[in-house]
């Protein structure tokens, strides 16, 4: 015990009410071979171009990264530019994953007591980010189809609202919003309220269903897009994500973000994902995930499951009170899944073997219910 006890430190009272971020469970080390499909990670190893870029960047790890991360921000801006609409580096704000960028948004917009509206159940980081920065989270229940209830979310906006987060596709339930749905919603939001579209899973959306969020961004000064390199690009362990925002907001994000957040290694890796061969291979991998998701949904439906239509790299079983039981059932059979209290269970689309195992577990569960 130190002479001055740490018990006397005055922690912020907000911490008492903070839900813990529960990471996807690691696979237990008890001899059973398990697949970890609890964190929406990519089942693919990093691309060789990424590994090479990381190795090269490591040689200069004694140096701080480029503070402005200009090369990467330019590459990201090019990626978001079309012949009709230019996006420049002044539109890009980076940090250590898009979770961190979401936190930057809260810090840039929310004074103590200001409100942030989002759907629930959605990404479990949102309440933590909002409350830990002194904001008030306003959670609007999903519809019975596990989709955002946009009319109710519009109703929930008050004088104190500074930010609305739409998670599309929604983690953990899967449905994605259409361009028209978002556009109708934006028409009901005062223009001083920022609307963040968290598109962490955008690359897994069926191409015919992709919302034209680039146009919505271009037309609405209060729209910001949140993107990550963790999911489709598969470098979750390196921690890099970004916002596409109008310059005034992008600059504000730059003011509040951790200096030198995205490491030089993360920046180099992210940059490598834009090399044409790398980008083509990533697109190929995303198409494979979409195809596997389609296969899972088809077989699960034939087994009698009624699941929300997922546009992410995961499927959601709305098992209610039986969620924990299903998770234990799957775990005992070699599949580590993610249970959300008494709401449901999310399972990541993984390697083929993991997906096959999910199908056999899901079938066995149903037979046990019927038997
Ligand atoms: C995984 C995920 C992110 C991305 O997190 P990173 O911090 O970039 O790894 C953001 N939003 C949602 C909804 C996610 O599921």
Image (cartoon, rainbow, N blue to C red):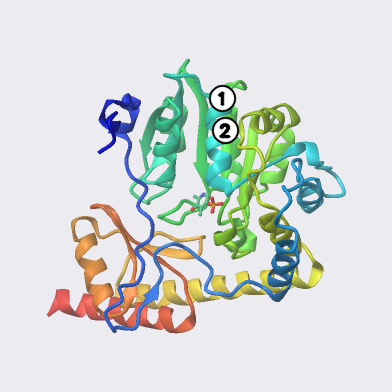
Task: Give above or below for 132 relative to 230.
Answer: above
The residue to which callout 2 is attached is 105
x, y percent for residue 154:
47, 29
Q: Is mark 1 within 8 Å of ligand 1?
A: no
* Residue 197, visible in the rendered structure: yes
Q: Residues within 10 Å of mark 2 (few under 14, many from 20)?
A: many
x, y percent for residue 51:
68, 71
Q: Residue at x 39, y 30 (%)?
A: 138
Q: Residue at x 73, y 59 (%)?
A: 268
In the displayed structure, does residue 12 sit left or right of residue 256?
Answer: left
Which corner quadrant holds the N terminus? top left
Looking at the image, the residue that sits furthest to the top is 159
In the displayed structure, does residue 259 sit left or right of residue 338?
Answer: right
In the displayed structure, does residue 243 sit left or right of residue 106?
Answer: right
Task: Give above or below for 272 relative to 291.
Answer: above
Element type where label 2 sits in the image: helix
**Whether label 2 touches label 1, CB < 8 Å:** yes
The residue to which callout 1 is attached is 109
Q: Nearer the viewer, residue 344 or 46?
A: 46
Q: Residue at x 47, y 15 (%)?
A: 159
**Quadrant hosting residue 248:** top right
Q: Nearer the viewer, residue 361 or 96?
A: 96
Q: Residues within 10 Å of mark 1 (few under 14, many from 20)?
A: many
Element type where label 1 sits in the image: helix
Q: Residue at x 25, y 52 (%)?
A: 341
Q: Which mark is residue 343?
A: none
x, y percent for residue 29:
31, 76
> Label 2 to label 1, Cα distance in Å?
6 Å
**Quadrant hosting residue 250:** top right
Which corner quadrant holds the C terminus? bottom left
């Amino acid at each position: 015990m130190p002479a001055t006890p740490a018990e006397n430190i005055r922690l912020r009272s907000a911490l008492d009410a903070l839900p813990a971020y529960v990471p996807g469970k690691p696979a237990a080390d008890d001899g059973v071979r398990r697949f970890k499909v609890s964190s929406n990670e990519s089942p693919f190893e990093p691309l060789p171009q990424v590994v090479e870029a990381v190795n090269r960047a490591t040689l200069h790890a004694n140096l701080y990264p480029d503070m402005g991360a200009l090369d990467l921000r330019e590459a990201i801006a090019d990626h978001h530019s079309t012949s009709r609409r230019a996006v420049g580096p002044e539109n890009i704000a980076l940090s250590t994953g898009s979770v961190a960028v979401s936190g930057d948004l809260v810090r840039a917009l929310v004074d103590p007591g200001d409100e942030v509206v989002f759907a629930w159940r959605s990404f479990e980081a949102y309440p933590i980010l909002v409350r830990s920065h002194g904001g008030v989270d306003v959670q609007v229940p999903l519809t019975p189809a596990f989709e955002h209830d946009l009319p109710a979310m519009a109703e929930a906006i008050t004088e104190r609202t500074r930010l609305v987060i739409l998670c599309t596709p929604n983690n953990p339930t899967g449905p994605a919003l259409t361009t028209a749905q978002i556009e109708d919603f934006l028409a009901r939001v005062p223009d001083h309220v920022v609307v963040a579209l968290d598109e962490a899973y955008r690359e897994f959306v069926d191409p015919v269903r992709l919302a034209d969020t680039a146009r919505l961004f271009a037309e609405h000064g209060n729209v910001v897009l949140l993107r990550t390199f963790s999911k489709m690009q598969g470098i979750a362990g390196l921690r890099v994500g970004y916002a596409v925002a109008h310059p005034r907001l992008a600059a504000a994000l730059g003011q509040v973000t951790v200096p030198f957040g995205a490491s030089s290694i993360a920046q180099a890796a992210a940059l490598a994902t834009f090399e044409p061969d790398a980008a083509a291979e990533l697109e190929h991998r995303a198409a494979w995930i979409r195809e596997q998701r389609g296969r899972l949904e088809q077989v699960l439906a034939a087994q009698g499951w009624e699941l929300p239509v997922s546009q992410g790299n995961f499927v959601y079983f709305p098992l209610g009170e039986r969620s924990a039981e299903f998770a234990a059932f799957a775990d005992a059979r070699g599949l580590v899944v993610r249970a959300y209290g008494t709401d449901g269970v999310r399972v990541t689309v993984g390697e083929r073997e993991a997906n096959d195992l999910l199908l056999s577990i899901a079938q066995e569960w149903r037979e046990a219910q019927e038997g």
